[in-house]
Image: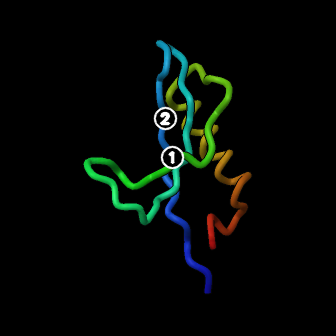
Amino acid sequence: MSQLRNIALTVHELEEGEFYWVLMEGTDYAMDDALPYLPLDAASDPQASYANALVAGVAAMRKLFGKDGPRT
């Protein structure tokens, strides 16, 4: 059986009122004072709210990985 990949979704407000989702993937890299995640995909256009960006990020994750989730 395949393993699930370690994918995280976060939302950043880069300018006031402009929210962008970011998908990140966990890595095995040893990094001092940092979470071991690297960017995988990100929104190119902002959303008007945190909630809208979060929903858009989930939709992007579903589009990338399908109904069975991110498997290796």
Mark 1 and 2 residues: CB-CB less than 8 Å, in contact? yes
Q: Quadrant of residue 52?
A: top right
Disc 2 packing (10 Å; few <14; some 14–19; many ≥20)? some
Mark 1 element type: strand
* Residue located at (62% from left, 23% from top): 46
The N terminus sits in image quarter: bottom right
Name, please, the residue furthest toward the top.
16
Residue under circle 1?
A: 9
Above or below for 16 versus 57: above
* Residue located at (46% from left, 59% from top): 26
Q: Quadrant of residue 43?
A: top right
Q: CA distance from mark 1 to mark 2?
A: 7 Å
Whole-percent x, y for residue 35 in the image: 35, 51
Q: Which mark is residue 25?
A: none
Residue under circle 2?
A: 11
Whole-percent x, y for residue 38 in the image: 50, 50
Whole-percent x, y for residue 51 in the image: 52, 32
The kind of residue on which mark 1 rests is: Leu
The kind of residue on which mark 2 rests is: Val
Q: Indicate left or right for 63 with 25 as reference.
A: right
* Residue located at (61% from left, 24% from top): 47
